[in-house]
Amino acid sequence: MNDNRAFLYGDAVSVYFFVRNGKLILTEECYFFLMASMRKMRMNIPLSFNLEYFIDILEQKITADALENAFIHFLVYRNTDDLNLAKSPVQFFIEAKQTQDVLQINKTLEVDLIREITVNTNILSNILTHCPENIYAEIYAKENELDDLLILNPNKRIARGIWGNFLFLEGNTIRIPKQTEGAYISPLMENFVTFVHKNRLAEIEQAEISPFESQKADEILMISDRKGIFSVSKIRNKVFDNKQFKDFINQWKNSFDAPEEA
């Protein structure tokens, strides 16, 4: 443990890979997100860290654990040695959490706003790394019998939730907080949003969203690379439906089952 800077200082980045029906999905998107995250943390990326290397490791994990549907947590951390940190070697830790279907909508969430903490809006705010604000928010949510929270940035606009990003459907427009607002980069969400846009199911707007605007939404979805997909049923006294998002998710999910064109 003395050489593990993830343990000592939180010096690590995470990405989640997705297994559906025994096969990897969105692997390239997740791989490139991991490479970008490591660069942002100024980690030394080994030459062996190519896409084929990761696919081999992940498929070995799928076979060894008999994974059918799962989130695979891939954490890369830096070691301490006599070199400068930018040249220090990295290692990784991998674990899997089985689920029903990584693309299905899970239980509904009851959410509220938290004002005691905010999250930043810099390049490190968008990646999955150590974040004490999330720990505080998770405890706060449990103590107040909530499932998640609207977390603001220093400009008092919605950045994200504890585990993922919120998508606000109003009429025929899905509004999503911009990454410059402190939202997570999410391969899972980006694939869903791309599907919605390409199939003209709704207009997509990356926006600056005040917490009061959340009350105007007809439906709210939360997409998390760590936890999955959830409908928001309630924020304070406002109750939300989930019919349109449910339909969008079902169409998106079916697109993964469609046979590939020759």
Image (cartoon, rainbow, N blue to C red):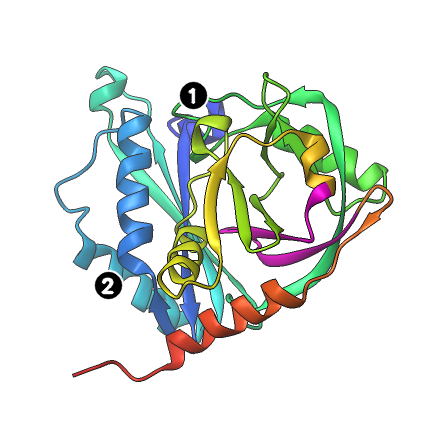
Quadrant holding the C terminus: bottom left
The image quadrant of residue 91 is: top left
Q: Identify the residue under disc 1.
A: 122
Q: Position of residue 54 (x, y in %)?
A: 25, 56
Residue under the image location 43 percent in, 72 percent down: 20
State yes or no: discs 2 and 1 in contact (Cβ < 8 Å). Answer: no
Whether residue 68 is visible to the viewer of this picture, yes or no, is: no
Q: Which residues are magenta?
A: 216-234
Residue under the image location 33 percent in, 23 percent down: 80
The amino acid type of the residue labelled 2 equals Asp
Q: For this view, does 94 lie left or right of residue 171?
A: left
Q: Is residue 8 above or below residue 23?
A: above
Q: For this view, does 10 lie left or right of residue 28?
A: right
Q: Earlier in the sequence, mark 2 or mark 1?
A: 2
Secondary element at image label 2: helix
Instruction: Report the disc number at residue 42.
Output: none
Q: For this view, does 24 lie left or right of residue 241?
A: left
The image quadrant of residue 39 is: top left
On whether residue 221 falls in the magenta region, the answer is: yes
Residue under the image location 54 percent in, 44 percent down: 175
On whether residue 9 falls in the magenta region, the answer is: no
Give 20 or 223, whichever is nearer the viewer: 223
Q: Identify the residue under disc 2.
A: 56
The amino acid type of the residue labelled 1 equals Asn
Magenta stretch, main secondary structure class: strand
Cα gap from disc 2 to disc 1, whole angstroms? 33 Å
Q: Position of residue 255 (x, y in %)?
A: 39, 75
Secondary element at image label 1: loop
| Residue at the left extreme, as displayed | 47
Give 141 or 97, whichever is nearer the viewer: 141
Q: Residues within 10 Å of mark 1 (few under 14, many from 20)?
A: few
Give 100 or 12, whichever is nearer the viewer: 100
